[in-house]
Amino acid sequence: MTEQSGGPALGPTLTEWLSARQETERHLTAGGTPPLDAEWVQKLADLLATERSWQEQYTDLIALGSSGGRFPSSNR
């Protein structure tokens, strides 16, 4: 499916995924050594969950064009 046919678009999803990755990186590298308190850990966990969610959405969109709408299982 393409944007022209009214289907999902990969571009915005990829952009959001990359944005989530950059925000996670900024959080990890902000100010040298991070304060390892509960608030910092929760923020990192939230950022990683957001990044993972966008990655899964992007992967699902790409899989739409593959045989059966799914990728083969990973070897990892």
Image: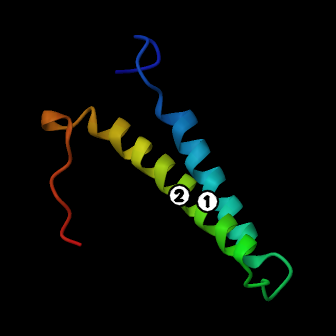
The answer to whether residue 44 is left or right of residue 58 is right
Farthest residue to the top: give it: 5
Q: At label 1, which amino acid type do we have? A: Asp
Which one is nearer the viewer's eye here, 11 or 25? 25
**Tag of residue 49:** 2
Please tell me whether mark 1 sits on a helix, a strand or a loop. Answer: helix
Describe the colour scheme in one phrase.
rainbow
Q: Mark 1 points at which residue?
A: 46
Image quarter in which the C terminus is found: bottom left
Quarter of the rendering containing residue 30: bottom right
Q: Where is residue 22 in the image (x, y as percent from the top left)?
A: 68, 60
Farthest residue to the right: give it: 31
Image quarter in which the N terminus is found: top left
The answer to whether residue 68 is left or right of residue 10 is left
Quarter of the rendering containing residue 7: top left
Please determine whether, in this image, residue 46 is positioned above or below residue 56: below
Q: Where is residue 13 in the image (x, y as percent from the top left)?
A: 53, 38
Please determine whether, in this image, residue 51 is positioned above or below residue 40: above
Gap in angstroms between the C-alphas marked 1 and 2: 5 Å
Please tell me whether mark 2 sits on a helix, a strand or a loop. Answer: helix
Q: At label 2, which amino acid type do we have? A: Ala
Q: Give the residue displayed 43% in from the left and 43% down from the top.
A: 58
Quarter of the rendering containing residue 26: bottom right
